[in-house]
Image (cartoon, rainbow, N blue to C red):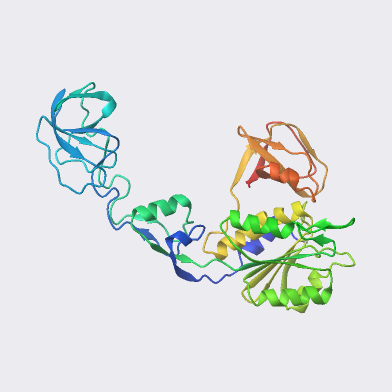
Amino acid sequence: MVSIEEALTLVTQQKVSLIPDELPLAQSLGCFLSNPITSPFDLPSFDNSAMDGYAVCGFDTAFEVIGEVAAGSTQDAQLKPGQAMRIFTGGKVPKDTTAVIMQEKTSVVGTTLTLEEEVVEGKNIRRKGVEIAKGKVVFDAGHLITPASIGVLSSLGYGSVAAYQQPVIHVIATGNELVEPGDEKESGQIYESNSQTLAAALQDQGFYCGSRQKIEDDLDAIANGIEDNLEQCDVLLITGGISVGDYDYVKEALEENDVEEIFYKVFQKPGKPLFFGRRDDQFVFALPGNPASSLTCFYVYVLPLLQKMAGGKGNGLMRLNLPLGHNYEIKFDRPVFLKAHIMDGKVRILDGQGSSMIHSMAKGNALALVKGPVQLSEGDFVECLLI
């Protein structure tokens, strides 16, 4: 059995193969850049108006309106002292413009513009290159492509980007008791939820579940399923069958498939019966069958490896130290990942901490890591993983 820190070190220090690829920008969300991005031009590429109003030349209170500049117009207009032009948000500012006056602060009679405020040089003008200068490094290699990143790259004219390929991930759920949601179930059976939960967690973190499969508690069936999936994926996630029960065949089936054990069992709660192994360039996590345990182990251990395999740093979820909003006692002699909710800068430990109870996890937004046994008081700081 290893500690949480030892397990994380063993996971994140694995050598991985990174495969760069040229991806269409629309398909790059959640990927990590393999090359730095530099700006091919100034952004904005021309002085433009920050709002609807009038471009004026000079510091007078009245101006002659000589024309109009619409957004998208390519004309190279120019103003002389005492002149103004109607301009719209994003419109190219005429040469020699002193400022843009918002239309609510003006009045127009005929061609005479009268201002209701003083002219302040440069006001309401977005200057060329003020956001990004030409040649500047916009994103370094390893940058995670977010929706905002796609917005920046689109603004710079990138239709595709050099990014690392993401790992192919498959999920196997094991158990005789499992029934597919939507089917009829009998007494003693339960609806299978882990594979769908993991697929959703993958998608939420920018990854994709390539295959979900349910296998009964049979050694040959599990061994064959592992063999088939390892021929097609980079990371295999298995839920259930990894403890020490009479029908827990996963560990034996992994050994039959020459999966090298890196660690088995972590000194924590929930999620103690966690297996991590490797076969060549492929990785296997055998996760506990209890839903909350399975998802907790995914967030803590699986996610950092996936991030590293995709070209990221492998830091996992964001962690913050925050004050507890109430007293709380831990009686366990192991570190505990507690389902928690952060609100107004404080952490509240939720009811329903059982390893099978995912309902409370669905109501929370964090996992609080506390090393027991301990009596915590309101205001004590605890480490939280933001989910």
Residue 92 pos. (x, y %): 22, 43
User: Residue 174 falls in which quadrant of the image?
Assistant: bottom right
Residue 23 pos. (x, y %): 44, 66
Task: Identify which residue is drawn at 62% across, 41% down.
Answer: 321
Q: Quadrant of the N terminus?
A: bottom right
Side of 14 relative to 87 (left or right): right
Residue 110 showing in the rendered view = yes
Q: Compared to 328, does 117 lie above or below? A: above
User: Residue 298 falls in which quadrant of the image?
Assistant: bottom right
Pick the front one: 386 or 51 = 51
Pick the front one: 65 or 386 = 65
Residue 4 pos. (x, y %): 71, 55
Q: How many marks?
A: 0
- The residue most toward the top is 116
Q: Compared to 26, does 72 lie above or below? A: above
Side of 97 relative to 181 (left or right): left
Q: Compared to 386, does 9 lie above or below? A: below
User: Residue 48 falls in which quadrant of the image?
Assistant: top left
Task: Identify which residue is drawn at 24% across, 42% down.
Answer: 70
Task: Identify which residue is drawn at 88% across, 64% down.
Answer: 245
Residue 3 showing in the rendered view = no
Task: Identify which residue is drawn at 81% across, 61% down.
Answer: 178
Residue 250 pos. (x, y %): 79, 69
